[in-house]
């Protein structure tokens, strides 16, 4: 029963299905299995490491300078972006060309920056969440949430792009309606 | 002359950022449920995007792509600061309701990705005109979505009661936003394909007429 509750809580907190964060990136990720793995891994890395950095920013930034949070988040994601590209280049130079497009796609999007802002808001509402562990856990869960939403979309992606769907609704519009129905199901679990 | 005109106006009808490119859709889905929210988002989006792309156009093109993308994001996050201060004066309630989606406007794909892929390949006057129409395209979709959702979900127009018999409260929720936007995208594509067919038929007739 606890597991069921955890799954429901996990689905209800999904940033894509409940907050529509990173939807455009999801369309690209769900296109093929290779893209799904590459993009979701990169997004999870960005959200997890980015959340750890966001914890330090939120902890150290004086309250009078809270407006500068976005600039620091952008700098953090930018550093991560360069760091991941460099790491990929030195670890797998032969696969670098394939990997880098997923890193480019994952760096600056709503799923990553939105996760950092969502956690900032949550920790402001509940100060007990203002710990490094909670930030990293939330960042990792956000990445897992993106993977879950991508898997749900991948299951229907081909059908939503098939010739059976009227040409005007094929692809993007059908995917949005499909995500809306899934989001409605998740909403009812809350 | 005709081709040039149509490509500048593409951002509104031919290649709308939201309905065709499916860009910047999260604020439309989540915050585009009342006209007041939409107005605040429209003003902020227009100011941030226009100023950021304009300033970013002076960034040297020879820099590596990654560095340029980071600089674009930094420029827009700096532009965001005065825009936020101004928005807090004009739309104090809406800014609170919009929450995290307000700073997210500064990292929208029109600034980060499309500026490099589309706008910076044009000459400056043409770029500014094209950018303006892309912004107008977003604004129009945002306003239309907010109008439909507020009217049908809450039975109001700009918080004033309207004579609506049947309310669909789900339209005010995120899933309602997903579904409505999906339907609008489909309708937009249909209208666009009909318009293009008619245009082609018209030009064919002209050719045969010659």
Image (cartoon, grey):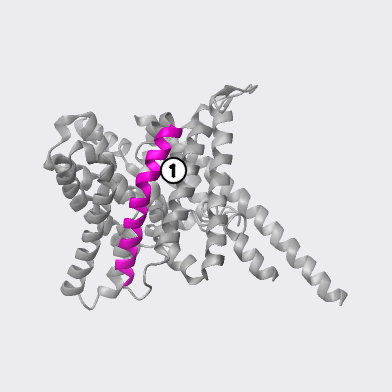
Considering the whole magenta stretch, tell me its main secondary structure: helix
Residue A6 in percent (x, y) is at 23, 35
Can residue B32 be seen here? The reply is no
Can residue A59 be seen here? The reply is yes
Q: Is residue A127 left or right of residue B174?
A: left
- In the image, which residues are magenta? B64-91
- Tell me if residue A37 comes above or below residue B28 in the rendering: below
Residue under mark 1: which chain is it in?
A: B
- Residue at x 41% of width, y 53% of height: B108
Q: Quadrant of residue A55?
A: top left
Q: Nearer the viewer, residue A127 or A7?
A: A127
Residue B113 in percent (x, y) is at 41, 62
The residue indicated by pointer 1 is B27
- Residue at x 18% of width, y 41% of height: A58
- Residue at x 58% of width, y 40% of height: B144
- Tell me if residue B183 comes above or below residue A32 in the rendering: above
Element marked by disc 1 = helix
């Amino acid at each position: 029963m606890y597991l069921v509750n955890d799954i429901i809580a996990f689905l209800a907190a999904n940033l894509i299905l409940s907050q529509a964060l990173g939807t455009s990136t999801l369309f690209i990720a769900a296109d093929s299995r290779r893209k799904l793995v590459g993009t979701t891994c990169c997004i999870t890395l960005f959200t997890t490491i980015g959340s750890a950095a966001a914890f330090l920013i939120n902890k150290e930034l004086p309250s009078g300078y809270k407006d500068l949070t976005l600039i620091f988040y952008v700098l953090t994601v930018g550093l991560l972006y360069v760091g991941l590209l460099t790491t990929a280049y030195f670890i797998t130079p032969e696969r670098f060309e394939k990997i880098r497009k997923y890193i480019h796609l994952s760096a600056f999007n709503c799923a990553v920056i939105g996760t950092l802002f969502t956690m900032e808001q949550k920790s402001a509402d509940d100060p007990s969440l203002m710990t490094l562990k909670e930030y990293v856990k939330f960042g990792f869960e956000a990445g897992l949430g993106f993977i879950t939403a991508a898997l749900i979309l991948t299951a229907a992606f081909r059908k939503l792009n098939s010739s059976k769907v009227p040409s005007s609704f094929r692809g993007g519009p059908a995917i949005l309606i499909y995500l809306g129905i899934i989001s409605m199901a998740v909403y009812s679990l809350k | 002359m005709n081709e040039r005109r149509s490509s500048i106006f593409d951002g509104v009808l031919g290649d709308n950022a939201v309905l065709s490119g499916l860009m910047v859709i999260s604020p439309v889905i989540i915050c585009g449920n009342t006209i007041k929210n939409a107005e605040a988002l429209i003003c902020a989006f227009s100011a941030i995007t226009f100023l950021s792309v304009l300033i970013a156009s002076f960034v040297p093109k020879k820099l590596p792509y990654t560095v340029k993308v980071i600089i674009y994001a930094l420029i827009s996050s700096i532009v965001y600061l005065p825009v936020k201060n101004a928005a807090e004066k004009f739309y104090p309630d809406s800014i609170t309701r919009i929450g995290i989606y307000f700073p997210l406007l500064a990292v929208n794909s029109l600034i980060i990705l499309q500026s490099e892929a589309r706008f910076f390949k044009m000459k400056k006057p043409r770029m500014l005109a094209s950018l303006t129409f892309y912004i107008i395209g977003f604004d129009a979709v945002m306003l239309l979505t907010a109008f439909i959702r507020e009217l049908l979900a809450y039975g109001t127009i700009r918080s004033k009661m309207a004579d609506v018999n049947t309310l669909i409260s789900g339209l005010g929720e995120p899933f309602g936003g997903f579904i409505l936007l999906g339907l609008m995208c489909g309708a937009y594509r249909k209208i666009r394909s009909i318009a293009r067919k008619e245009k082609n038929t018209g030009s064919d007739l002209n050719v045969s007429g010659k």
